[in-house]
Amino acid sequence: METNERYSAWLEGVRYCVYVKKLRTQVAIAEGIGIEKQSLNAILKRRKGKRASQRLQDEIAIAIGHTYEEMLSLGRHILDGNDPEGWRPISINVGIGVMSEAEKKKMGAKTLPRKIPIISWVQAGDWQDIVNEFHPGDADEFIPVFKNVSDGTFALRITGDSMAPEFLPGDIIIVDPSLQPETGKYIVAKIDNGNNENGEATFKQFIRDGNQIYLKPLNDKFDMMNMTGKVFRVVGCVVQKTKEY
C-alpha cells in the first residue's frame, strides 16, 4: 500500500473511532498527546492539507486506545466497503512494537497507555473464571489507561445511581483485580446471597470496622450492606474513573 493510501486508511480508522464510536473526545486525545484541539481537528478534517507525522499517527492511535496498525487495519476494512462493526481489534494491550526507538524517545516521559476492555457487569461477576479465556473480540469497546495496572484489569460503565454523586451513570471505572481491598477503597464485588440471580457484580465502598465488614453506597438513599459472615468475593479495586463529555 502506498504512503498516501496508508495515511487515508489510518485516518479513516481514526475518524470512525472518534466520530462514530466516540471512544475518546478530541479534547482528551489532544491533551493526552500534547497538542491543541484545533490542530487535532484540522488533522481529522484534513483542513488545508493538514497531515499528521508518523509519530503523531502512532500517538493519536494509542490515545484512542488502539495501535497504529489497528487503525490502519480498521481503515482498510472500511474503505474496502465492509461493515466496520464486523472489524475486531488485533490485541487487548496497546503494543509499542510498531514504534521505532527514536519515536519512543520522542515521547519522553509520557506514559504509554494500555488498552483495557469495557465489559458487562455480568462478565465482571465471573471475571476470575473467564479472564484467562477472554479474547480481544469478546469486548466491543476498549479504553486507554495511563496508570500502571496489572494484567486482567478491566473497565465498567456505571449504570445506576447507588454511588452518586461521585460516580454517575455513564462514568467508566477502571478495576484492577490484583489489588487487595482496604477500608475506604472503592471495590467491585460478587455477592452470593441467593438474590443475585443474574450474576452481576456490585460496586460499593469497602468499609472495615473492627471485625465488621460493610459495603457502603455513597448515595444516602441506599442502605449500608453489612457483609460480616456473608459470602462475597472482591473482584477488584477501582483505580480510576473516566468521564467524557
Image (cartoon, rainbow, N blue to C red):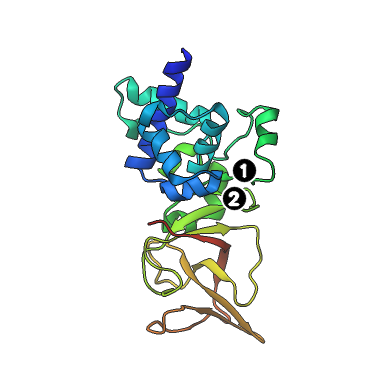
- Indicate the amino acid at tag 1: Leu
Q: Secondary structure at mark 1?
A: loop
Evaluate whether residue 187 shows in this view. yes
- Residue that appears at 65% across and 73% down: 182
Up/down of 20 relative to 55, above or below: below
- Residue that appears at 42% across and 75% down: 165
Image location (x, y in percent) of residue 94: 57, 38
CB of mark 1 within 8 Å of CB of mark 2?
A: yes
Residue receiving disc 1:
112
Residue 224 in the figure: left or right of residue 78? right
- Residue that appears at 60% across and 58% down: 177
Q: How many marks?
A: 2
Up/down of 157 relative to 59, above or below: below
> Disc 1 to disc 2, how far (Cα)?
6 Å
Q: Residue furthest top?
A: 2
Image location (x, y in percent) of residue 12: 37, 29
- Residue that appears at 56% across and 54% down: 128
Up/down of 221 relative to 152, above or below: below
Q: Earlier in the sequence, mark 1 or mark 2?
A: 1
